Amino acid sequence: MDRCTVAPQSVVECHDCGLRQRHPDLAPGQSAYCAACGLKLFQHKPRGVEWALALTLTALVLLAVANFTEFMTFEYRGRSQDNRIITGILELRRLGYAPLAALILLTSLLAPLLHLSGMFCVLTCVQLGRSPAWLGPLFRRLEFLRPWAMLEVYLLGIFVAVVKLGELASIEVATAFWAYLALIVVATAAADVLDRRSVWDNVRLAGSEGRA
Amino acid sequence: MTGSLACPACALLCGVPAGTEGAVLACPRCASPLRHRKPRSIEKTWALLVAAALLYVPANALPVMTVTILGHSKRETILGGIVELFQSGMWEIGALVFVASITVPLLKIVSLAYLLLTVRRRSSLRLEERTRLYRLVEYIGRWSMIDMFMLSVLVALVQLGWLATIEPGPGATCFAAVVILTMFAASSFDPRLMWDNRGGER
């Protein structure tokens, strides 16, 4: 593919309706919305990168705890069964539902893990003021991956399952459940404090000084 | 003819050098291909949508799980599971699952078909509302996965040999396919195509 030149950045194009409009100067906390369709174009969030980096690191630790410790115990007529998040995926695969198992593995574990660790790399680079050649392409792919990380939906699924089984037997939640709950709060906050534009502003353009 | 293209991924406004018409340019910041509109958006969205609509039928008609308690097996469809929640008095949870599993996929299929038809009719009416509808469709898609996650937890927890087991059913695979197909359909639709018709009115 050919490279192209960079046009003046005083103009932005709305992602949803394609309207070109002047890029306003924003005070901290202020947001800019598209004049035609009302899409939030961006919000000026000061110190967003620092906060997002700290929260992402916390989320990674919580993700490890949530996956490597026991999730909940199910007891029915004296027999009990311990369970980790991965157990459901392995059981589905064992019972002949490999595609479904793969989808759940992707949305509940792989996508969140890749997204969080990728974001950790990107935010560390931005924080250190570095801009390696892979930074832009990596951040682009992470944005693409984002809708497939469904931690909060998974939590609702667990909630419905627990309610459904509640009548049948007793269920005790363990460490991983609380770690998971905290993980969702922290991961949501990490996404919320970050102004994506401030990351993009730190990515060096190909062809600019330093690269041929 | 525009002299510049906005990157679909990082929003960088890129100048298109003379003499490169017809070639696909790469964004100098994130390497994404630069295109005026999403390529073959209408055809792709229709194809994914029709596939999703067809699979919506077996997803609801076939059992998503088989519950066996002390030798008694019972097959449960998505709607059956919801009815059971209502019957045991948990109507809040029942309503939640009903919205996530029945309403949301249907709403997505109907809404995207409606948006595609308005693009075809070159409608310039209610552009803001239609764009808002598109954003809603894009946002709510993931919540349909509740039922699949519930199933994976149930299958993991209830493996107690002859006492009680829960196994998945073929409806689950169809349902998961509907969720994926509608998510791809939503992302392949280009809402800017609706706004492109605004000029025709003037």
Image (spheres, rainbow, N blue to C red):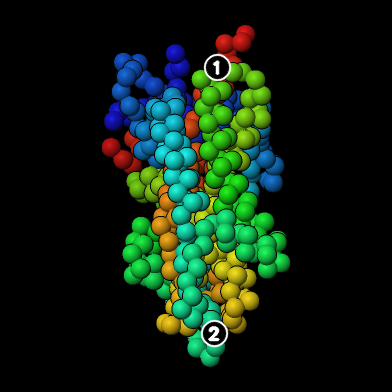
Picture residue at 56% right of the left edge, 52% below the top: B101
Between A180 and B35, the residue placed more toward the observer is A180
Lateral position of residue B98 relative to residue B91, left or right: left
In the picture as drawn, the residue positioned furthest to the top comes out as B202
Q: Secondary structure at mark 1?
A: loop
Picture residue at 54% right of the left edge, 57% below the top: B78
Instruction: Quadrant for the C terminus of chain A, please.
Output: top left
Q: x and y percent of residue A139 in the render?
A: 43, 48
Please state which amino acid type lies under the numbered disc 2.
Tyr
Lateral position of residue A212 relative to residue B194, left or right: left
Question: What is the number of the mark on residue B122?
Answer: 1
Instruction: Quadrant for the N terminus of chain A, please.
Output: top left
Does the image show residue A118?
Answer: no
Between A201 and B178, the residue placed more toward the observer is B178
Does the image show residue A94?
Answer: yes
Q: x and y percent of residue B139 in the render?
A: 57, 45
Q: Which residue is mark 2?
A: A76
Q: Residue B32, located in which quarter of the rendered image?
A: top left
Picture residue at 60% right of the left edge, 70% below the top: A164
In the picture as drawn, the residue positioned furthest to the front comes out as B72
